[in-house]
Image (tube, helix red, strand yellow):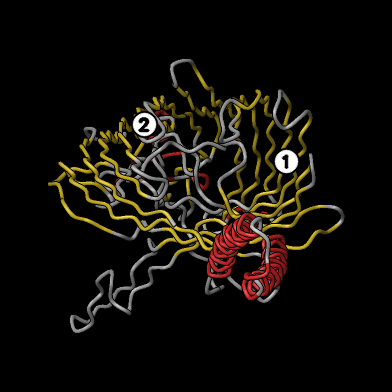
Amino acid sequence: MARTQTQLEQSQRQLDEMRKQLSELQREISQSGSSAGTQPPSVPVSTSSSKAKPEATSTAIQDIRDRQAMQESQIATQAQSKVESESKYPVKVTGLLLLNGFVNTSAVDMAATPTVALPGSGSTGATVRQTILGIDARGPHLFGARSYADLRVDFDGNPSSSNSPAVYSGYYNSNTTLLRLRTAHAGLRWEHTEAYFALDRPIFSPDVPTSLTAVAIPALAWSGNLWSWNPQVGIIQDFGQADSHGVRLQAALIDVGDAPLSPTAPPSGIFTAIPPSSAEESRWPGVEARVELRGPIVNHHKDHSHFGVGGYFAPHSSSPLGHSFDSWAGTLDAHLFLPARLEFTGNFYRGQALGGLGGGAYKDFAYRIDTDSGGYYFRPLDDVGGWAQLKEKLSERLELNAAFGIDNAFADELRQYAVSRGPVYQNLSRNRTYTGNVIYSPSAYLQFSLEYRHLTSSPVIGSPARSNIIGLGAGYQF
């Protein structure tokens, strides 16, 4: 903006100078016109030449005026798009206004964002709760590094409920709680090093399957995609040039939340409004690390092919059950650019007690009550899974995606803790998802998608449940 303002001032000075020259020429022409009767025959030629000069000058002035108008328009556009912050540093508002329609042929756990198939009839509907709102900010330089921060929220929070029929608890009522924090990042970025803290997916699961209908809960969640957002503090070190082959090292401390099925009741005689998680009760943070081999830049988006190896370990302690256990994982991930505009992306893991990261069939461990002693039989669950996606970019506006994911808690470990007629998540052992979609982007700001998903959820007791999901997505990105 400062450079544009300087150019505008320079153009204004040129315009003023040209006006002075035009005034002088007009004065000379006027004087020559008054003494036309005493001039020799050659005067008309001189007068014609003098008339040509004002015309050329007028053309130059008009050109300067056009450039000045364009520069004023650019300054006005920049001033209009600026968001002012208390720190006076640049802030940008971004987002995705997203409308989703869905048809579920059988029962699922959540109609708009299904992850588990259930026995029962299907459902049809639409939602805008997967809309995302974001803020990106750049801050001052510190220790030779650029500072940055960003924040993302959506509207997929849990609606409040009431036992009174007089209080409407619909999604769009003012009594509902919709706003939900998704991710947040802040850090310092040097040329080859970055230090940060974040609320985001684990570093050993860096890639996300592509979908415009599974946004609030990412595609293939609980079917091989370790996605859950947890607080982390980490560092990244790159070796090699940014546009060529290189190696990236990542390490972080992570505070992993409890799995959805974990008991949260406090010990007898103690009450806290929000009880600590089992990882927090251990009083030790989790650790995670990843090594990435990176290829050269392959397109104008500055994307790299990469192959990564990761690991994770976190101690846990459950006061309600009176047991301690460890959560761990080893991972492999890859994102490869192939010939014919094909891309392969995938992630594989093998570990234990991964419910807090989005695996383990919604649980870290299996347990049941000993009716004689009142204690608990308890066992952390081994888990294996992963996902893979193949993308075909037919053009910059049209792409096809096909993916498969599976999460498998070991059935022989879970079977002895199964509960007849218990909650579906407690007996769930394996969850699989097949999906395919087409995404069309007529412009950089508009997106449309048609997607098909097939869910198969297998408990250790009873028959698997299946559901077909057809989803439509229409988004405006700003």
The structure residue drawn at horizontal position 46% and vertical position 40%, both measured from the top left corner, is 359
The structure residue drawn at horizontal position 18% and vertical position 80%, both measured from the top left corner, is 165
Asked if one can make out residue 276 in the rendered structure from this viewpoint, the answer is no
Does dot 2 land on a helix, a strand or a loop? Answer: strand
Residue projecting furthest to the top: 339
Q: Nearer the viewer, residue 91 or 233?
A: 91
* Residue 24 location (% of width, % of height): 71, 71
Q: Nearer the viewer, mark 1 or mark 2?
A: 2
Asked if one can make out residue 90 in the rendered structure from this viewpoint, the answer is yes
Q: Is residue 327 left or right of residue 197?
A: left
Whole-angstrom CA distance, mark 1 to mark 2, is 34 Å
Q: Is residue 404 above or below residue 139?
A: above
Provide the residue designation for mark 2: 399
Q: Is residue 146 above or below residue 202?
A: below
Point out which mark residue 291 bears.
none
Provide the residue designation for mark 1: 251
The structure residue drawn at horizontal position 43% and vertical position 16%, both measured from the top left corner, is 340
Q: Are marks 1 and 2 in contact (CB under 8 Å)?
A: no
Quarter of the picture holding the N terminus: bottom right
Tag 2: amino acid: Glu
Q: Is residue 251 left or right of residue 115?
A: right
